[in-house]
Image: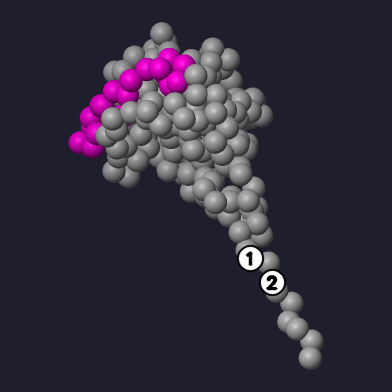
Amino acid sequence: MKWITPKKELRVLGIAESFLKKSPINKSLLAGVVMRADLQIDGFGFSLCTVGGLDATDAVLSIYNQLGRPDVRVIVLSGTIISLYNIIDLNKLYECTGAPIIAVSYEESSGIEKFLVDLPDAEKRIEIYRRNGPRIPVRLRNGYIVYIRPVGITITNATNILNLFAIHGRYIEPLRVSRLLARSLFRFLFSQSFKKPEIPEKTP
């Protein structure tokens, strides 16, 4: 368990995704933003994972590795279950990077295990889901409640770090920016895939 000092030089990597359920490409785009606690953006990274697959953990690791930033002290994720039940293995992520993980979500939930049993590789998904542990509600200094899964870091320390970046309501700034970036880049790269094919006019 690590203690990360909340200070303005602290750099975190925030990762969020964007995808469409009925997209022909069947891919989700993940964007990573390196941000200092003084809100300076200090780097970007991107990767793809499969909608409904089991490669979300590798996609997050790909962003971390391509950045090559040992000064990133904490990884902050927009949830652990992305791309239609593609579950991020928080413990594997911590073991591979050595950086504490804080997965953040914003709504109450009774859990999703009942939805996993009917999916391919259900046992593997449920194993990861259970190992990730329960979500813990914490109150930010601005009064908003978020739900976190911290790995390699205490609840108190994780909350202190999130407070550094909570400037737009409950939304954590590195996650807000990475989500906007993922959404814009996804639309730019794959917009042609969403267009209906043009039907040529009949010649008289």
- Are the residues flagged by discs 2 and 1 in contact, CB closer than 8 Å? yes
Residue pushed farthest left?
Answer: 143
As drawn, the label of residue 26 is: none
Name the residue carrying label 2. Answer: 198
Is 12 placed left or right of 162 in the picture?
right
**Tag 2: residue type?**
Glu
**The N terminus is located in which quarter?**
top left
In the figure, residue 164 lies in which quadrant?
top left
Tell me the residue at 75%/83% (across/down). 202
Whether residue 61 appears in this view of the structure is yes
Label 1 amino acid? Lys
Residue under numbered circle 1: 196
**x 49%, y 27%: residue:** 87
User: Residue 121: x, y in percent?
Assistant: 55, 24
Q: Which residues are magenta?
A: 126-147
Q: Position of residue 7 (x, y in %)?
A: 39, 25
